[in-house]
Amino acid sequence: MSPTKLKSLLTGAFFAIIVVVVSSSVVASDLRPFKPYTSDSFGGGRRSNDGVYGALTAIYWSFSTPEGGYIGATNAKGGDETRWVYDLGTDALRRQANSLKIDMLSPSTTLGTKFEVGNRRGHHGWLVSGYGLPSQGHGMSAQNVSMAIRDEGNFDGSAYGVSSVGYLWGPQYGTVPTMVFVDQGPAGPNTRGYLPDPSTGNYTYYSGPTVTTTDTGSTAVSSGTSSYVPVGATYYLPEVQNLPGPVTVAPLPVTFESIAVSVNSKHQSAELMYTYRPHPFAWGSMELLAGARYWSFDDKFGLTGVNTIVTGAPGSISAFEAMVVNAEGKNCVLGPQFGLKLYRHNARWTFGAEGRFTAGINAQTIKTGGYITPNSDYAPVGLHGSNNTNFGHAQNKTYFSPILEGRLSADWQWTSAVSFFGAVNGQFADNIARGVRVTDYVVKSDGTIFGIRGNDRNAHVFVYGVELGFKINR
C-alpha cells in the first residue's frame, strides 16, 4: 500500500472515531448533525457550543528558507570567506570565494492534515490536537561554481621542495612546447621517417639515397644513412606537444562544473491543553489555554558537485573530481504551552484570533556525512592515494527553543452541529538547527573533514500558511 493511500485511510479512520466519540457521548441528547441552524438572540446572541467536538483540517503551509549565508567556509559572522589558490593561467595565486548563497533557494508549500478533539462543559474543557506536514523541498542547480574551503592542514612538504604544505595543496604543472616523436606503426615499402638509434637513443632520419640528415630542433638527430625505412619496422614522425613543465606545489582551487543543492524539511506537532472559558463579555468571548506541546522539525540538506576530469589535460585543475555533502538537523521540542483565544459571534459567523507560546526544550540531533573524490591528475597532498575520502559526524545537544504561534479564523455555522472554517496561521521557532547551516567546510590539521559547525545550529524557522476544514459539535 502506498504512503498516500495509507495516510488517507488513517485520516478517514480517525475522523470516523471522532464521529463515534461525539455520537456516543451525546446519545441522550440525540446528536443531529443536520438539524437546521437557528439563531437565538435571547441574552445577546448565539452562545458558544458545549460538549464534545471534533475538527478535521487541511493545512497548506510553507517553511521559511534558511537565513542568508554562503555555502562553503564562512567567517565567524557567517560572511563570505576567501582562500588563496594557484592559478595555472597566470602561474600566480588568486583569491577564491564562495559563489553560492543559501538565500538563492526558493521556498515551497506542501499540503498536510490537522485534527482536533475536545470537550467543553461550562467554564472548563480539554483539547487534543495535532498535525503533520510531509517533506517539502527547496532546490537549485548551478554551473561553474567555486567554493572556499578552509585548509588547516600542515604536512611535510620536503618531497616537493618546500618545508610544509596544507591538506589541499598539490602539484601544479606548467606546460612547455616540446618536440616528441610519435609512433607511426609498421612501415610500408619506401617509407620515409625516423628510426631510433640503439647506441645513442637519438633518432636517425631515413628518406632515400639523396637525402641528408637534419636537426629537428629540440631533439638532436644523428647522422643517418641514405636508405628507406625497412618494411615492417616501427618508424616515428616529430610532433610538437604541450607537455608538463616545472612542478609548482600550491593550494588547489575547489571548483565544480555543475552542482546541485537540495533542502527537504518535515514538520509535526501535537498538544494536550486544558481550556477555561469565563462568562462572555460585551465584545465577545475568551478562552485561556494551558498544557503541553510536542513540536518537531527535521531539516535535511544535500549537495552534489562534479567535475569532468580529462586525464593528462593540465587545464582541468580542481582539488576534487566530485564532492557529496549530506547534513541533517533534527529538532524535537517539548515543553509547557500557554494560549489565549478571543472570538465573537455574528449570526452564523464566528471570528477568532488566538496566540500560543511554548517554552520548549529542544533535543537536537545533528548529522553530517558524505565523501570527496580527489582529482586523479592533481591529487592533493593530504588525499594522495585515496580514491574516496569519506566523512561522517554526529552530535546531540539541548537548547531552549521558544515557539510563538498566531492564528486568525472565520467560522460559518452550517447546521446546528456542523460548521466550516478557514484560517491563516503563522509560527516562529528559535534555536532550530537547519541542515544547510551545520556543515563546517574546514579540513583540520588532524585530518577531520567537514565537521559540525557549532555557531550555526541556532537558526530560526517560520511556518506559515492557510487552513480549511470543518467541525462537528454536539
Image (spheres, grey):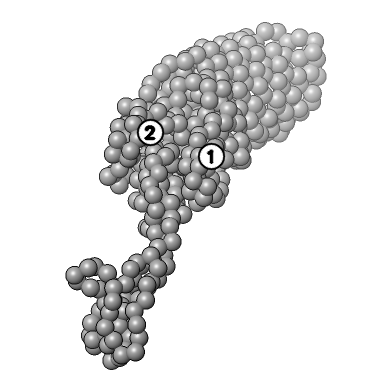
Name the one closer to the observer, 317 or 25. 317
**Which disc, if any, is residue 440?**
none
> x, y percentage for residue 271?
51, 20
Q: Amino acid at mark 2?
A: Gly
Classify 56 as above or below 146.
above
Query: What residue sits 43% from the left and 61% below the top?
Result: 177
In the rendered image, the quadrant that contains the C terminus is top right
Residue drawn at (56%, 22%) of the image? 77
- On screen, residue 417 versus residue 451, left or right, reads right
State the mark number for residue 94: 1
Task: Specify which label sits upstream in the sequence, 1 or 2.
Answer: 1
Is residue 408 rendered to the left or right of residue 247?
right
Q: Badge 2 local density, few (<14 within 10 Å), some, or many (20+)?
A: many
Q: Nearer the viewer, residue 99 or 316?
A: 316
The amino acid type found where label 1 is placed reads Arg
Q: Quadrant of residue 189?
A: bottom left
| Element on which disc 2 rests | loop
Q: Is residue 258 visible?
A: no
Relative to 87, residue 207 above or below: below
Q: Is residue 266 above or below residue 240?
A: above
Q: Which mark is residue 166?
A: 2
Q: Residue drawn 61% across and 24% down?
A: 427
Q: Which is more toward the observer, 129 or 219?
A: 219
Element marked by disc 1: strand
| Residue 104 visible in the snapshot | yes
Q: Residues within 10 Å of mark 1 (few under 14, many from 20)?
A: some
Query: From the viewer's perspective, is 452 left or right of 259?
Result: left
Percent across and percent down for residue 53 are 58, 25
* Location of residue 185 in the rendering, given as x and y in whole percent from the top left corner: 28, 79
Q: Position of residue 443 (x, y in %)?
A: 39, 31
Along the viewing direction, whichever of 134 and 196 lies nearer the viewer:
196
